[in-house]
Image: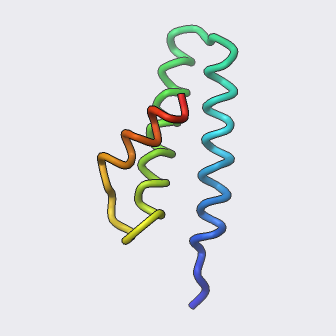
Amino acid sequence: MTDITPQLSIWIQQLRAIAQTGLAFEPRVYDQERYEALLNLTAKMAATVNGSVSLDPALADEFATQWR
């Protein structure tokens, strides 16, 4: 079986970049909520992929905070 962790990490970084770029342009409230939701989702994904492949909520929160 092939380890897909490196590819998942690439996709996570791409999604994070989309969310950060969207937030950088001071979107309307509706769009801002969507970009923040995307950022939080990617933080959860990163916290799951990095480590034991189980969600670490504290690590997800830390990623989301750092990425804003």
Q: Residue at x 66, y 19 (%)?
A: 24
Q: Residue furthest bottom?
A: 1
| Of 30 and 57, the residue lying toward us | 57
Q: Is residue 49 above or below residue 1?
A: above
| Residue 36 in the image, given as x and y percentages of width and height | 49, 27
Q: Is residue 34 above or below residue 9?
A: above
Q: Which quadrant of the view contains residue 48?
A: bottom left
> Number of marks in the image?
0
| Of 30 and 47, the residue lying toward us | 47
Q: Residue at x 60, y 75 (%)?
A: 4
Left or right: 37, with 9 as reference point = left
| Of 17 and 68, the residue lying toward us | 68
Left or right: 8, with 29 as reference point = right
**For the N terminus, which image quadrant?**
bottom right
| Residue 16 in the image, given as x and y percentages of width and height | 61, 41
Which color scheme did the rendering employ for the protein?
Answer: rainbow
| Residue 26 in the image, given as x and y percentages of width and height | 63, 11
Q: Which quadrant of the view contains residue 15?
A: top right
Q: Residue at x 41, y 67 (%)?
A: 51
Q: Is residue 54 above or below residue 61?
A: below
| Of 68 and 8, the residue lying toward us | 68
Q: Is residue 29 above or below residue 59?
A: above
Q: Residue at x 40, y 40 (%)?
A: 62
| Residue 21 in the image, given as x and y percentages of width and height | 69, 27
